[in-house]
Amino acid sequence: MIRRICFYHLKGSADTEDVFQNVFLKYMLYEGDFTDAEHEKAWFIRVSINACKDHLKSLFRHNTVSLEVLAEEAAVTRPDYKEVLEAVLALPAKYKDTIYLHYYEGYSAAEIAVILKSKENTVYSLLSRGRSMLREKLGGDGLDE
Amino acid sequence: MTDLTNKIHDAFDSVEANEELKSSTARFLREEREKRGGGRVRRPAWRTTFAAVCAMAALLVGVGGYYYTTRTPVSYVSIDVNPSVELALNRYDRVVSAAAYNEDGVIVLDGVDVKGELYTEAIDTIVESEAMRPYLTANATLTFTVAAGDSDKESAIMTGIENCDGCQEHGGQSYTADVTSIAAAHDRGLSFGKYAAYLVLSQYDNTITTEDCQSMSMAEIRERIREQEGGECDNEDHGTCNGENNGANKGGDNSGQNGSGNAGEGDDNSGGNCDNANGGNGQHYGQGND
């Protein structure tokens, strides 16, 4: 999960390693308690997203997606997966988290709002616009509501 | 779930932390731990070891925890007509695996790919597939059996199933079963849905064997149960027959699972037989241990 969040935020593998390690360092040093596994997972998501954003702020980065970046992902071998991942990576940053959390992690808009400390309506509109953008890029039969 | 939604799920599934990243992170955490302890009085060796073990455990929990929550089945749905198919669902109700428990089931699963789909979508995909069509005749009995080891979860899944197009269009019936029966069912080469029906029938007919049930369709097993019950309501355990039978809201209430509800008269059914194609649902299979 952390790897995936790093992937769609950072794209480059070297940055991913830095952030990945940082997240676990924070986890190691974290002194709070988790009420359950779900709470712990939400903590990881929030910390990973924040770590990625902090990392991006601290460095000058090109905000473009290239096939070369995806080529570094040895596991992504299928052309249709590359196409989908490129489309998600090409979304403006604010849409990526909601799209990922909803379509991959299976969170509802209300749950995403809690994790991202955002408003539920904002999440709905991000999901809706994100879906439209993906539909434009990928065509096909669209995405579930 | 649409094809594109599946693609997003599968595409992200292909991105994961490789071994190199995991081991470099473990190394990094060890070094950090040592560094942070470096300026202090040297700690006893056991404490250093303990700290390293904690760091490794944290890493394993973090990396492995995700794998655990998305890939580990926590609930199961058995779909039985004559084809017997089982879906294993993760905690997010997505299909982790689909398995066939007879030859017809193999044929059905050959034609569909439901991995990663929500169970409701997977059920619609399977029930409405070309391969399933020949089996869903007017006399067929489409049965869904849910096992999750948690009555709230089972209730939620049953409600989802009963609202599926595939369930409603074909008059499916839903039941719950004990999660502990799954291994016994598989040992005998049956889906746990069919095995649960076998257990009910075997209470009335001790000559029936699991081998017999392997070659019987669910409609045949249910018919035998009805015969044994003398045409009474099909509530072999604490079950209910919710006699409303409108096909649109099929016993989504929990009464069938906790056995407290409405012993059915099937009053708007023909012959008082609740186990018809459009009704009788929300029952608990098994041996009175719900």
Image (cartoon, coloured by chain):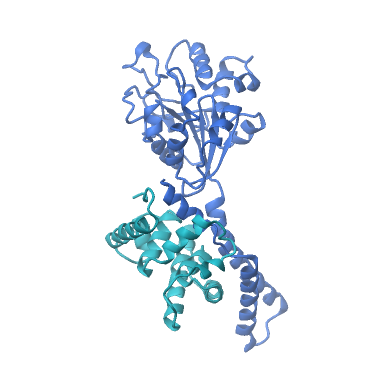
Chain colours: A cyan, B blue
Res B54 seen here: no
Res A69 seen here: yes
Based on the displayed image, in which of its 4 quarters is residue A129 positioned?
bottom left
Q: Nearer the viewer, residue A10 or B80?
A: A10
Q: Quadrant of the N terminus of chain B?
A: top left
Left of B189 or right of it: where is B220? left
- In the displayed structure, B79 sits above or below B114; it is above
Left of B228 or right of it: where is A63? left
Percent position (x, y) of residue B48?
68, 77
Q: Nearer the viewer, residue B75 or B262?
A: B75
Percent position (x, y) of residue A38?
47, 58
Query: Which residue lies most toward the bottom here?
Result: B39
Q: Residue at x 41, y 80 (%)?
A: A57
Query: Which residue lies most toward the right here?
Result: B45
Based on the displayed image, in which of its 4 quarters is residue A116 positioned?
bottom left
Q: Nearer the viewer, residue B116 or B266?
A: B116
Q: Nearer the viewer, residue B209 or B200?
A: B209
Percent position (x, y) of residue B237?
49, 24
- In the displayed structure, B21 sits above or below B244; it is below
Q: Residue at x 34, y 57 (%)?
A: A136
- In the displayed structure, A89 sits above or below B70; it is below
Left of A27 or right of it: where is B276? left
Percent position (x, y) of residue B8?
45, 55
Counting labels gives 0
